[in-house]
Amino acid sequence: MMLKAPTTTETPSFDRIEEGLRRAEASTDAAEAHGSLCGLVCGLGAGAQSAWLAETLADTQANEAVARQTSTLLVALAASTRAALEGADMTFQPLLPDDTEPLVERVDCLAQWCQGFNHGLFVAARIGDAEAALGGGNTAEIVRDFGDMAQVSVGDEEADPEGEAAYAELVEYIRVSVQLVYEELSEVRQRVQSAGIH
């Protein structure tokens, strides 16, 4: 089955990214990959995409056509994610499974997303020689919180309203927190871009 290439203004769905990564035999899944992308974008800005693609597809064993299709999907995701973070209308959303999926699966993906974000942020800090920027302000607190959230899980029991409400609160916390980190690291991104670091 051929994967339709989206336009750069369209955000590919979680399922399409997951399918593309699976077909490419990538070693990461959609949630963790998007978290990593967001961490890299916060620290590197425009330079994030090439670093992210290289890492996400580093171990793929897929043939050239499949790898190219998946790369096209990932480029579209990177473009729409960066546009959402750069925009003034606060449209950023973490890439997570649809709310019709079981809560246990969504929570697991949320944990992987947070793990990916912290990984991407630390990689960006190393590339940009900006580790000190992670040590203070909102960013340091958010990194600690995301580290805790990367450990969350729920039992296999049926979803309950309290569990759904708690999950929704975590997703909203992620959404707002990433935008705060993006704002706080604006000077880091400017330095990286003026230095031509990719």
Image (spheres, grey):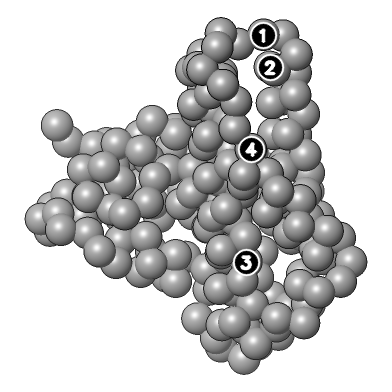
Q: Are marks 1 and 2 in contact (CB under 8 Å)?
A: yes
Mark 3 or mark 2: whose residue is earlier in sequence: 3
Q: Is residue 168 above or below residue 55?
A: above
Seen from the viewer's position, the closer of residues 21 and 93 is 21
Q: CA distance from mark 2 to mark 4?
A: 14 Å
Q: Is residue 35 visible?
A: yes
Gap in angstroms between the C-alphas marked 3 and 2:
28 Å
Q: Does 194 appear above or below 55? A: below
SS class of the residue under badge 4? loop
Quote the CA–CA distance across marks 1 and 4: 17 Å
Residue on which the image places disc 4: 152
Earlier residue among tags 3 and 1: 3
**Disc 1/disc 2 C-alpha distance (Å):** 6 Å
Query: Which disc is residue 164 wearing?
Result: 2
Instruction: Indicate the position of residue 37 as horizontal and vertical percent values.
Output: 52, 58
- Residue at screen point 57% across, 53% down: 115
Q: Give the secondary structure at mark 3.
A: helix
Does residue 41 appear in this view? no
Q: In the image, what residue occupies the spot 39% across and 45% down?
A: 29
Q: Which mark is residue 121?
A: 3
Query: Does residue 46 lie above or below 38 as drawn?
Result: below
Q: Nearer the viewer, mark 3 or mark 2?
A: 2
Q: Please tell me which of labels 4 and 3 falls first in the chain.
A: 3
